[in-house]
Each structure stands twice: as structure tokens, then as C-alpha cells.
Amino acid sequence: MGWLYNTIIYAPLYNALIYFVAHMPAGDIGLAVVILTIGARLILSPLSYKSIKSQIEMKALAPKIQELQAKYKDDKARLSQETFALYKEHKVNPFSGCLAVLLQLPIIFALYKVFINDLSASADLLYSNLVVPATISYQFLGFFDISEKSLVLALIAGLAQFAQIRYTMGKANTETNVKATTTQEVFTQAMTKQMQYVLPVIAFIFSYTISAVIALYWATTAIFSLAQEFIVRQQIEKRRLRKEEIAGIRDVSAQKVQ
């Protein structure tokens, strides 16, 4: 199983990093890390799109789900039946977002392993046309030594993670605007709000205690995710408005015919 994982996921990412380092100015490994991270996230974009789309759809249905919860609070079986009927009606799969995230995890873990290891540590996995570059610079953009700890990059990683979560949660609050009514819902909302502060702190601690390479990877991932979610939301909103516009034209046409 380990051989299969190395062959299909880890080795291609490792060789890609070697390739990028060899083609960066002065062998800047920091730039190579940024490019490889963005490249990997672009490959995962279809899965990320499904995850973001699923979140948006679930948030849009939140008020209706809470209405069902209030209506069938004493009949759990009927509540489950009506909830899944609602999902079916709106063509929403509540598990698609989770599945998309799970499918991304092996690649994310492989990226982490690629960045944290020495470039020569997996030389046996190099493709025949590649060699570990003789010149490797750990001075990212000439300012940060990413072979060591960097307080600045760790702070950037933490702030980028905070901005990404804040954007997502801000959109969630705007779209749902649903007040918690049960103890469980209050607890869930409280935990969700806490995560916007806990995850950035975790990002900062990991980025600073391990190495600046992880900080660079984490910051790049958070910024890319923020930009990706913004773009996806804009696309979905344009499609929604377009559908409403088409529906409005059809209604006007139907009235004229009558």
C-alpha cells in the first residue's frame, strides 16, 4: 500500500518540486513551493468546487431544515424522511462536500511530506530525467530563510488562515441568518465561531515550530482557498441570477400569451 501511495501521489509531487527548483531563479525553493502548492490546488479544484458548492447549497437550505426540525421535533423518523426529501427536491447531496475533502487529504499529506523532508531524502524516487539540483537557495525572495523558523511567515500563515475562515463564516452568517433554537444548535454555532480563532492559532504554531517551509505552504493554501471560494461564489451567484432572469422572461411571455 505504501508503494502504491509513493508511486501514484508522493513521487509525482516530489519530482515536480525538484523540477520547479531546478527552473527557479537561483534555485529558489520557496518559489518552487508556492508554484507546486498552487499547481496541486488547481488539480484539486474540481473537488474543491464540489465542496464549496455543497456548503453553499446546504447553507441556503438551513432555514427550511430548521422549519422541519421545529415541525417534527417529536418525530425523528419523519424528520429524517422530510429532510432527505428536501435534499432530493433541491438536488443536494449533503455528503458530497465531505467526500470531496476526504479525497483531497492524501494529496495534502503528500505535499506536507514533500516540503518537510530534505530534497535528497527521496532521491530513489527521482525520475530518470531528473537530478537533485546542485544549486538550491532557501532564501525565499531574498528575504526569508525557509530552512529555519520565521516569525513573519508564521504570522502571515495565521492571518491568511483567519482571513479565509472569516470570509467563509461571514458568508455563512449572511446567507443563513438563522438563529439557534436548541442547546445543540447553540453549542454548534459557538464551536463554529471559536474555530475562526482556533485554526489560525494552530496554523501559526505549526508554521513557526516546524519550519518556514510549512508556513509558506500554509499561507499559499489559505490565500488560494480564499480566492477560489470568492470566484466559485461569484460564478454560482451569476448562474442563479441568470436562471431568475430566464424564469422572469418566461413568466412575462406566458402572461402575454394569455
Image (cartoon, rainbow, N blue to C red):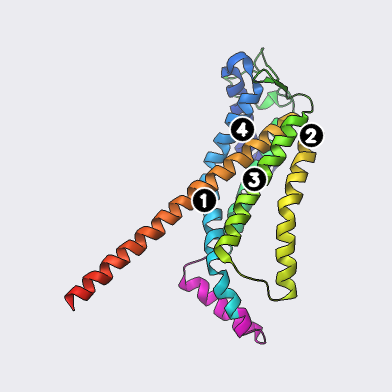
N-terminal of the two: label 3 or label 2?
Answer: 3
N-terminal of the two: label 1 or label 4?
Answer: 4
* Residue on which the image places disc 3: 163
Question: Label 2 near label 1: C-beta < 8 Å?
Answer: no
Question: Label 2 near label 3: C-beta < 8 Å?
Answer: no
Residue 157 location (% of width, % of height): 70, 37
Q: Is residue 82 above or below residue 16?
A: below
Residue 226 location (% of width, % of height): 58, 45
Q: Residue at x 64, y 16 (%)?
A: 133
**Mark pair 2, 4: CA separation:** 24 Å
Dividing the picture into quarters, in which one does residue 256 lie?
A: bottom left
* Residue on which the image places disc 2: 208
Q: Residue furthest bottom?
A: 74
Question: Label 4 near label 2: C-beta < 8 Å?
Answer: no
**Mark pair 1, 4: CA separation:** 22 Å
Residue 49 is tagged as: 1
Q: Is residue 257 above or below residue 3?
A: below
Q: Is residue 3 visible?
A: no
**Range of magenta residues:** 69-92
Label 1: how many Cα within 10 Å (few below 14, some 14–19, many 20+): some
N-terminal of the two: label 3 or label 1?
Answer: 1
The C terminus sits in image quarter? bottom left
